[in-house]
Amino acid sequence: MPKTSATLADGRELLFFDPAGTAPRTADDQRPLSPTAHLSTIRRDPATGAWVTIAAHRQSRTYHPPADECPLCPTRDGRLTEIPAGDYQVAVLENRFPSLAMRSAVELGDSETPLRAERSGTGRCEVVCFTAEHGSSFADLTPDQARLVLDAWTDRTAALAELPGVEQVFCFENRGAEIGVTLAHPHGQIYAFPFTTPRTARMIEQAGVHRAATGRNLFEDLLAAERAEGTRVVLAGEHWTAFVPFAARWPYEVHVYPHRRVPDLTRLSEAERAEFPGIYLELLRRFDRIFGPDQPPTPYIAGWHQAPAHRGDELALHIEMFTIRRTAGKLKYLAGVESGMDAFVNDVAPEDAAARLREVAT
């Protein structure tokens, strides 16, 4: 997989990922950009121990530009964009408005106390452009194109985990204005966090409880149970299974696990990598058919859950995908108990959701 590195006008890194046999790309950013100041910090909530990122400088980020002003399209016909090339397959670039950055302009004193823990927002945020085609989506990719995205995710997971201060790498996609997406171009993001995220910390804790009680790995047992019961399995291959979790939080939520437990993307075998694009593309296309042919594309969030860079060997790599649409024309809003107490109430039985996702198979 050829990978070409370039530098944008303000000093940010841009990477091109191409199929084997492709010549290295060239990029010359002609925009008059100045280096930006990154002012984020992370603060620990003393009541829960969770870290919260404070990034007020992001208020000025690009917001719903028209299609002919999309910053993630290739640079063509004299219009300069974030991608200074006439075309590309997969492009990864440092976010121009990052929540976390390695070059922080914040200076903090030595006044940390148990109730006031604050640190520089050190980390990295990257944008992953899945294709140069503005009106496309991940579901429209070919298996070879989806494999190239998987390879890019893997490459970035390995590189970002080695950065000083990085504890966890999270590759994810938000699709749809209902989710809060502000750029319509098909893309995802990668966050390199300077802490272990709360959901991951809870999963590691539960894995420890399960190990102490049974002597086995929680995620291996969870996958085996779902495959044996079969009621909530949506589709399965030789190396991967997609299923609706027993206690799904969202109306339509699917988790996809490799059959062999690995901690992160870098540990997948070639056979597992080869099969994943077909499984994932079929799942995405089914999501778009859940609510009927007259409905707009289904908004969703999909993210890779990986073990932290320096701990959490019990955690199993998997991707979690869900939509906030609960039925045609209606969204699942996080109301008081969900937003205020993180106590979810699901409007669709997980078994019914799985059955519907099997019904809309091609």
Image: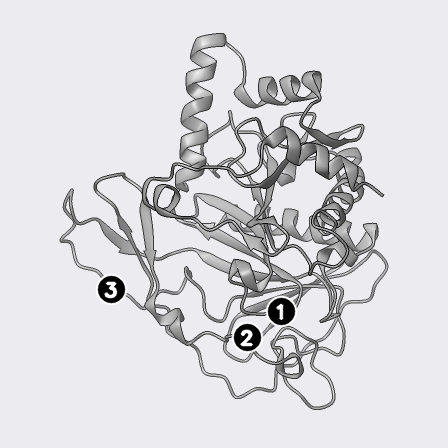
Q: For residue 1, say whether it is visible.
A: no
* Residue 144 appears left or right of 97: right
In terms of depth relative to the viewer, which is nearer, 194 or 302?
302
The alpha-carbon separation of the residues under discs 3 and 2 comes to 33 Å
Q: Are marks 2 and 1 in contact (CB under 8 Å)?
A: yes
The residue that mark 1 highlights is 184
Does residue 271 appear left or right of residue 229 in this picture? right
Numbered label attached to residue 156: none
Rendered location of residue 174, percent (x, y): 57, 56
Residue at point 80%, 30% (across, down): 237
Label 2 amino acid? His
Q: Looking at this view, is 194 or 326 the one in front? A: 326
Q: In front: mark 3 or mark 2? A: 2
Residue 104 located left or right of residue 360: left
The residue at the far bottom in this view is 78
Say what secondary structure mark 2 lies in: loop
Q: How far apart are marks 2 and 1 (CA)?
A: 7 Å
